[in-house]
Each structure stands twice: as structure tokens, then as C-alpha cells.
């Protein structure tokens, strides 16, 4: 137990997908967890020592709560909307937060990040004024400040574009949208972790996709680590990305970047300056023993982004996949096989979002995932054999006995 953490009172916003990591580190170090949020059914409320059902974006209520309950730190794992609405006033509360309002506005606004990154030599995906007559279709239209595939459309005609702009605005906190050339290329993702002003790049990955539903973008079926474009990403992006974080004064924290390789260059299309929903930190913890969630918790309470990051300077020792079981819309009647899957020696973690009786309303979007299944192997061929075995074990049926599983792509 770390004496400097014992008895510290940590408020938590959100965190449903990191409950395992949060509760483990809290129990090991005597940290008192205080869940804050106005959703009574939130999973974090079920495991915390204290629960307060207030709106995390209500400045007056949050300030009063933190003062009256003598809260020492804040771990915010909420979605982008909550963080954006709260980062400004939390930044001035004397509470350590992983982002200032300025850092958040640049790193989490797609248009602003493109412009800022361009100063450091990072090429930008071509974009258009949605009103221009010179647009070359297809294009993709997105809110500048939202994730999870909400508000995103792929357009092939002017009529589709006009509808997409309105849809994106409805899903934007600021009402602003970005219209970009739709690129066809290999997907990639990487993260930068910062500790005391030093940059680490713990992984790269590529992705297999489900077929798109309507005009929504494709959604992940499997994340594969490391990316076969690892060298290209490192050569083109690591140095300028480190310079960006130096210039913004981000000394500690983590940020995810995803993009497409087009004409031999890795173009960045999205960022997540927070603990991302894909839970890539579990891959890094399995391979390197570095607990990113614990680092964020320690920073919130002490100002130190803890952990020994030295192992992150080396490539991943094994190959990995995160398998996403996607569902069609409907009410879940029966789930078969997840318990058996969890017992496989190559499955080192499994996270389930929905249960029997829940209704799936988000097929075709990022939230369509029943479970994320974390698989490891000596090499990518072995990992793909494990993936094939896993998907044969899982069945999901609706109330009428019809399969709810989306059609898997070829592995």
C-alpha cells in the first residue's frame, strides 16, 4: 500500500469500462472512491464507497460537492460531451485535471487539431466547405467535437451531403462540422503517453471491419496489434506528435490517434485525449505490466503520473487482438458462450456491455458491441486461429429466437 495514497478521496465521473482497474488500484492503496453522476444505474455507483447523483456539468453543484466532501482528486472517464462542458470550470478549481481547456479544445476539435498539427509538418486530409460547388465525392461529414460515430455520414451526392451536415450539427456540442475527402486505405491507430514531459508510444494497431450500415462509417470487428505499418507510423508521426505535446504543455497524460494510410502516408482522422472506449490500455498492461488507469488515478491525487514506463520504449512482445461482437438491433433474449470463451487460456480479459433483456438500438455504430474479447498469441497467425475459434462459440438470439449477430468479416 502506498502511504501517500491511503485515505485519499477520489471522485470519479463515468468509468464504467474501467471499473476493474479503478477498484483494484483503489483497494490496493486504500483510496476512497466517490462516484458522481446523475445516472442512478451507472455501474460505478454500485462499487463506490460514496455516491452523489448530480450532473457532472453543473458547475455550482460540483464545486459545492467537492468543497463539502473534501475531495482530493478527480478521475474523469466520461464521454466527450461531459468532459468538454466541465473542463473549463474544473481547470480553475485547484483540482488536478489531465487537460486544460485550451489543450482540450485543440486536441479534441477535429478542425482545430488539423490546423495545429499542420504547423509541425503533419499532412492534413483534404477538406471542403460543405457549400462549395467544387466538392469531389465521396466525402465524410463529422461533428468537429464528438466521437463514437455519432453524427458521422459518408456522402456520395449533394443531397446526401446536405442531410449529413444537418445530422452532424445536431450531434456537435458547438454546432460545427467538418467535411473531408473520404479516403480508402488501411486503418491504423496509436497512442502517445506522456510522463514528466517525455513521450512514449506503447502500441500500434490495425483493424478489421464489419460492413457499413447505411451511410454510417464501418465499425470495428477486430483490432490487431501491432500494425503492419508500425515503421511508417513511427517514422512519419512520432517526432512531430511529441513536438505538439511539448508545445501544448501536456507533460502527463494519454491521447489516442486513428487514421488511414493513403498514398503511402498515415493521415490522422480522429483523436481521443482521454481513456478511450477501445480499452487498448489492457493490451499494454498485459504485455508491459504498465497500468495506465492507475497512472491517471495517481496523477489526480498526487500530481505524479506514476508507473515505470521504461518498458514502453520496446515493441510489443506478443501479438494481440481485441474482438468486438457486433449485434443487430433488437431485444436480447439469449446469450450463449461468453463464459466458455472467458475460460480459454489465450483470452486474458473480457468486457461485456449488454445482458439478456437489454435492447440493442445502435447497430452500425460504435455502441453495437456486445462484448470486447481480449486475445493474445505468439504471433498474428496464432491470434487469428484463436479469433476463429472464439466466434464459433458465441451465439446471441432475440426474443423470437432469431440470431442477432452481425455477419463477421473474413479473418
Image (cartoon, rainbow, N blue to C red):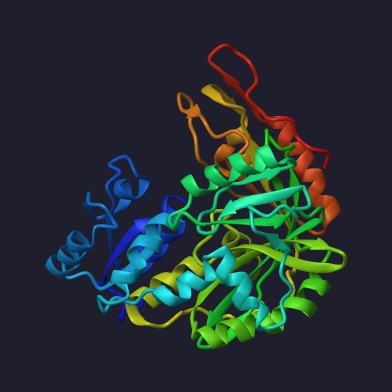
Is residue 220 shown above or below 28? above
Which of these two is toward me, 259 or 341? 259
Identify the residue at image location x=34%, y=58%.
Answer: 13
Q: Position of residue 288 (x, y in %)?
A: 63, 71
In the rendered structure, the answer to whether residue 248 lies left or right of residue 316 reads left
Q: Which quarter of the picture shows residue 61?
A: bottom left
In the rendered structure, the answer to whether residue 219 lies left or right of residue 380 reads left
Is residue 17 shown above or below 106? above
In the rendered structure, the answer to whether residue 336 lies left or right of residue 101 reads right
Total marks shown come to 0
Q: Position of residue 341 (x, y in %)?
A: 64, 38
Q: Position of residue 93 (x, y in %)?
A: 25, 75
Q: Which quarter of the picture shows residue 285?
A: bottom right
Which of these two is toward me, 349 or 84? 84
Which of these two is toward me, 296 or 111? 111
Which of these two is toward me, 142 or 31? 142
Find the residue positioned furthest to the top: 400
Asked whether residue 218 is in view, the answer is no
Asked whether residue 2 is in view, the answer is yes
Q: Position of residue 106 (x, y in %)?
A: 51, 73
Identify the residue at image location x=46%, y=71%.
Answer: 104
Find the residue positioned furthest to the front: 133
Identify the residue at image location x=72%, y=50%.
Answer: 139
Give the quadrant of the C terminus: top right
Give the quadrant of the N terminus: bottom left
Amino acid at each position: 500500500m502506498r502511504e501517500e495514497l491511503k485515505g485519499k478521496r477520489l471522485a470519479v465521473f463515468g468509468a464504467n469500462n474501467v471499473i476493474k482497474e479503478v477498484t483494484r488500484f483503489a483497494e490496493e492503496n486504500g483510496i476512497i472512491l466517490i462516484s458522481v453522476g446523475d445516472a442512478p444505474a451507472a455501474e460505478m455507483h454500485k462499487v463506490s464507497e460514496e455516491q452523489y447523483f448530480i450532473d457532472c456539468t453543473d458547475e455550482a453543484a460540483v464545486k459545492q460537492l467537492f468543497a463539502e466532501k473534501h475531495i482530493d482528486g478527480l478521475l474523469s472517464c466520461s464521454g466527450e460531451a461531459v468532459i468538454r462542458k466541465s473542463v473549463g470550470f474544473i481547470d480553475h478549481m485547484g483540482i488536478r485535471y489531465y487537460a486544460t481547456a485550451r489543450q482540450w479544445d485543440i486536441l479534441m476539435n477535429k478542425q482545430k487539431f488539423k490546423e495545429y498539427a499542420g504547423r509541425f509538418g503533419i499532412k492534413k486530409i483534404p477538406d471542403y466547405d460543405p457549400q462549395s460547388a467544387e466538392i469531389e465525392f465521396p466525402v465524410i461529414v463529422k461533428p468537429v467535437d464528438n466521437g463514437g460515430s455519432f453524427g458521422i455520414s459518408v456522402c456520395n451526392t449533394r443531397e446526401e451531403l446536405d442531410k449529413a451536415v444537418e445530422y452532424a450539427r445536431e450531434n456537435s456540442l458547438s454546432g460545427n462540422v467538418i467535411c473531408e475527402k473520404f479516403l480508402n486505405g488501411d486503418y491504423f491507430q496509436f497512442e502517445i503517453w506522456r510522463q514528466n514531459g517525455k513521450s512514449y508510444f506503447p502500441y500500434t494497431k490495425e483493424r478489421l471491419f464489419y460492413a457499413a450500415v447505411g451511410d454510417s462509417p464501418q465499425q470495428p470487428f477486430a483490432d490487431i496489434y501491432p500494425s503492419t505499418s508500425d515503421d511508417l507510423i513511427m517514422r512519419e508521426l512520432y517526432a512531430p506528435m511529441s513536438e505538439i505535446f511539448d508545445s501544448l504543455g501536456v507533460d502527463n497524460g494519454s491521447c489516442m490517434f486513428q487514421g488511414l494510410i493513403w498514398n503511402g502516408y498515415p493521415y490522422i482522422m480522429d483523436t481521443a485525449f482521454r481513456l478511450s472506449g477501445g480499452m487498448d490500455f489492457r493490451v499494454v498492461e498485459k504485455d508491459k505490466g504498465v497500468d495506465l488507469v492507475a497512472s491517471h488515478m495517481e496523477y489526480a491525487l498526487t500530481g505524479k503520473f506514476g508507473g515505470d514506463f521504461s518498458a514502453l520504449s520496446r515493441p510489443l512482445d506478443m501479438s494481440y487482438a481485441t474482438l468486438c461482437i457486433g449485434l443487430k438491433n433488437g431485444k436480447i433474449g439469449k446469450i450463449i458462450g461468453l463464459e466458455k470463451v472467458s475460460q480459454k487460456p489465450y483470452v486474458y480479459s473480457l468486457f461485456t456491455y449488454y445482458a439478456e433483456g437489454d435492447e440493442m438500438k445502435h447497430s452500425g455504430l460504435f455502441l453495437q458491441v456486445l462484448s470486447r474479447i481480449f486475445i493474445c498469441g505468439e504471433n498474428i497467425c496464432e491470434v487469428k486461429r484463436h479469433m476463429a475459434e472464439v466466434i464459433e462459440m458465441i451465439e446471441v438470439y432475440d426474443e423470437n429466437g432469431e440470431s442477432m449477430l452481425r455477419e463477421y468479416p473474413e479473418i
